[in-house]
Image (spheres, rainbow, N blue to C red):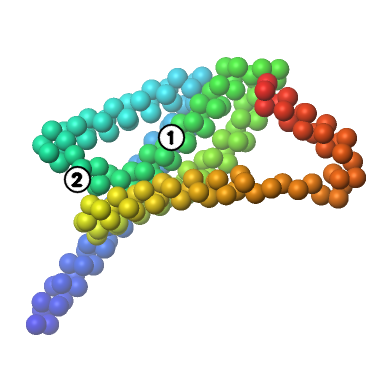
Amino acid sequence: MAEAKISKWRSESILDIYNFSFATFLFTHNAQIAIFAFALGFAFAVPTILLILYNGLMLGAFVAVFAAKGLGPNVVAWLTIHGTTEIFAICISGAAGVRIGMAIAFPGRLARMDSAVRAGRIAATAMVGTVIMLAVAGLLEGVGRQTIVNDGTRLLIGLAALILPFLRSTKTRRTPCRPGPAAASNPGGLARKFRLAEGWMTS
């Protein structure tokens, strides 16, 4: 009896170590793809678009193999638990890279370096969120996917991981921005700032 308990405890410990190692490997792998998608944007965004397209084709081929065997819903659930967060994060990284590439290719009234620096600041903020999303995706893929075997539960977790960030961003955008006392006492200066911001967005 004692030997059986010890054997079970060892098996569970080995499985926990494997899940943690697998999650770490997946986080590293996905982070590399996201970094490449972001960094290659400096080459006028063309390599970034090709990289995203290549990974999308690989994912589609992977699903097609299982769908041909009648396992389409199962593989979709298997991927959804982590894929919604992971794919969305990689797409954000690609979009950040494209943003920098477009700023270099079409700087508008700014110098190319100034345009790239301005776009890089925005892209860097997006990349911080991407790192967090990839960490969550790594845990869901390395641990959650191995321990949760029900397809419906996998779908619910994946959809929740996809919807919650949208709800958060929507709530943040709807928060009213009220001018402070200084802005209220100087409405002309506030209007001038809005005009400058509008001109920057359209440039």
**Cα gap from disc 2 to disc 1, whole angstroms:** 24 Å
Q: Is residue 85 left or right of residue 81?
A: right
Task: Name the secondary structure under disc 2.
Answer: helix
The numbered dot on residue 91 is 1
The residue drawn where x is 54% and y is 23% is 101
Farthest right residue in view: 185
Q: Which residue is mark 2?
A: 74
The three-letter code of the residue at mark 2 reads Asn
Tell me if residue 141 can be seen. no
Q: Is residue 78 left or right of residue 2?
A: right
Residue 76's spot in the image, x, y percent? Answer: 25, 42
Relative to 203, residue 19 above or below: below
Task: Name the secondary structure under disc 1.
Answer: helix
**Front: mark 2 or 1:** 2
Q: Is residue 194 left or right of residue 77?
A: right
The three-letter code of the residue at mark 1 reads Cys
Residue 96's spot in the image, x, y percent? Answer: 52, 32
Q: Quadrant of the C terminus?
A: top right
Relative to 47, residue 64 above or below: below
The residue drawn where x is 54% and y is 40% is 126
Q: Are marks 2 and 1 in contact (CB under 8 Å)?
A: no
Mark 2 vs mark 1: which is more N-terminal? Answer: 2
The residue drawn where x is 83% and y is 37% is 190
Observer-nearest residue: 91 or 19? 91
User: How busy is the neighbourhood of tag 2: few (under 14 within 10 Å), some, or many (20 plus)?
Assistant: some
Q: How many marks?
A: 2
